[in-house]
Amino acid sequence: MLELQKIKRTIIHFIKGLPILFICLFGALYLAKTIIKYTQPKYRTMAKIELDDQKYGFSGNNLYSDFDVFTAENKIETEAEVLKSDLLISKTIDKLELNWKIERKGELKNCLLYKDSPILITADSTESIVDKLFILRISANEYVQVLNEEEEILAQGVLAQSFRLNEAFVTINYGENGKDLNGDYLVKLQSQNTWIDQIKENLDVKAVDKEISILRVVYTSENPEFSATFVNTLCDIYVQDYVETKTSAANQALGFINSRIEEIEADLSDSESDLERYKLNNDVVNTYQETETGLREISKLRLDLINLEANEEAIYELEAYIEAGDYYDETAINFGFGDLNLVELVKKLKIHSDEKKDLELKYTAQDQRVKNCQEKIDDIKKYIKEAILRNKQEIKTKRESIENALFALEHQFDHFPTREKEMRRLEREFMINESVYNFLSQKKIEAQIASSAMMSFHRVIQRAQVPQKPVSPNKVLITFVLGFLGIALGLIIIFAKRFMSGKIYTMEDVEKLTSAPIIAAITTQEDVNNAQQAFNNLIGQIELDSSKNQIITISSSMQKEGKTFCSEGLTEAYQKMNYSTCYISLEAKTNSRSMKSLSALIQSPEKVNEFKSETNVYLGFDIEERNITLQLAHKNFVPLLNTLRSRFDRIIIDTPASVIKSEAAFAMKPADLILYIVRCRKSSVQYIDNIELMKMKHEIKNVQVVLNGAHETTNYSGMFTSSKFKFENGKKGIFQKAKTLLNAYSK
């Protein structure tokens, strides 16, 4: 409920301040319209460039893979910086032949001219006028005046004729659009650095996305045609510069390769000669094959030597066998010599020995048959011995021959490490020169292809168009921002007025400043019916609290807070309810209601009996009286009030302002109920403390506040509610109800 009351109070202040709000809003909108009207418009155009991607682009194709062999992989950020570089911008400026900057001067804003300029300016010397601003004034008779920024005349002349300006001779001719020349122009011969600085301020080059190799080139200018022309020219210069740079790099590389090939070719020829000469001098055919063949021969000779040693051992065994002569106990030949003839002879020797043994069993040793057998045995033995001697000699000879051959073969590898090292050095030098030569030959072919291929894999995929609408000033944004600021300013004024006024507006303002309770609220003084109903409610609250409140004192802090209005209204309300009332005014005023003299009653209290038969009596001071305070301090004042208490049902005392005059205190102290009037939007916050001051200083009790002039949508207790208002002003239809409430809240 309390939060709803706060919202309603805020809404009331907002609605009451709608005129201020509308004034601020319309003022802000008018200011926005003025700013938009007199702000120099700027036009923005955009072009897009697709960068070559060596992984996925055309240059990744096998056919084109060698075209950019000498260029590094393009980075998006790098290419963006290249597009914004002074080099490309200066080339663009040179191609567009930018020198003079011409603006048509207006009363509030200037207009930049480009190809639509009605004048063309040429100068034979530029050092004395470069980067200096001049005002060019052309009159109807083609008369020209050149002024400086302080509008001092520097030179004069005629169109199409040269005249001297500083140290230069300047000529002004008709342009393509040279119909309307009259007027003032701002002209400036800008240096290339100045053009570059101005262009870079308005040039923006960014990637569409960090993962997409597409650059967006955006330029903003006061002239739409210049914006599109500059962006398209810059993109063309970028692509052309890429081709020229690539071709130049390829040509430089080709020249370097040709010079290196000549050097490497000479080195390769020398290496071939050295290798050939070494092989001829050292009889080198194939070192690996020679080594393998030598090792095989050594192995074979060693096997032959082993076989020879085995045969020699067998010969020695055969010789021992023959020398022993014991052929009868042996059943087989026990030697390993492999000569078949000797084997056969040994077998025959065995046979003849066995034959002799058999003959000796039958015959004597002198028998001719035994002797013949012995002779055969001796002949065979003699032959075998001769054979053994020859074989031993032959084995010895073969041993010496094999050992000599083996020695020679084994020592042929003694010089192999040195020869192998020298061979490897010569072969390594030859192979290095050969590989470098082959590499450079391949690169020479690639460089020739790259230098001959006049193409670029960067391409402009969207050319800049001449913009039709300006991007600055942003009408919607300016209108919205200034409109918002206007509303904010209006709200600030409304609530600043509310909080800085130092006035009482609502019941909560009173509750924050005093502990006295609020007994009722009176909505308005203009509407008699509402005021009468408010006084009836006030009487209801008074009588509800206590029926013994016979003396009611009504006071306020300052004048014009409605205490007299409330006093008279409360008196009339009691009279309509058939209460006998006595209305006492403590201020000197005109006796407009046939007031009886209060001074006479104070001096002679018995005079009360004179209007014993009257039901309603009005008492007061004459306007000429100046000693009201002394009369209220008279000893008969309080007894007079007690006498009147016994005579009338209710006594209503209207006091002067309690902050201005002290008479109010005399009427408050004997009163049963004190109604302190606080008027909304009139009573000052600083005087509400007077309630607490009087309560403490004069020991006054039972003080209650009446909120006078409260908003008509509040109820009798001062709470904001529209239910009563709707009920009493019932309208059919939601629009009628809304209109009624709006009218009520805006008052």
Image (spheres, grey):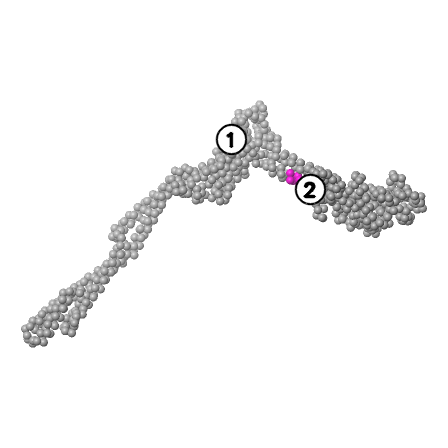
Residue 730 visible at all: yes
Question: Which of 289 and 7 lies nearest the eye of the viewer?
Answer: 7
Seen in the image, is 512 located left or right of residue 311? right
Q: Magenta segment: does it hold 491?
A: yes
Residue 134 visible at all: no
Q: Mark on residue 492? A: 2
Residue type of the residue flagged with mark 1: Ser
Tell me the SS state at disc 2. Answer: helix
Above or below residue 172? Residue 214 is below
At label 1, counting other C-alpha atoms closer than 10 Å, the crowd grade (few under 14, some 14-19, many 20 or more) is: some
Which stretch appears magenta?
483-492
Residue 638 placement (x, y as % from top left)? 89, 49
The residues tagged by marks 1 and 2 sit, at their Cα atoms, a distance apart of 61 Å
State which quarter of the image contains the C terminus. Answer: top right
Dominant SS type (magenta)? helix
Question: Which of 424 and 674 lies nearest the eye of the viewer?
Answer: 674
Residue 685 placement (x, y as % from top left)? 76, 46
Residue that numbered label 1 is attached to: 125
Seen in the image, is 449 located left or right of residue 533? left
Tell me the SS state at disc 1. Answer: loop
Question: Which of 539 and 500 lies nearest the eye of the viewer?
Answer: 539
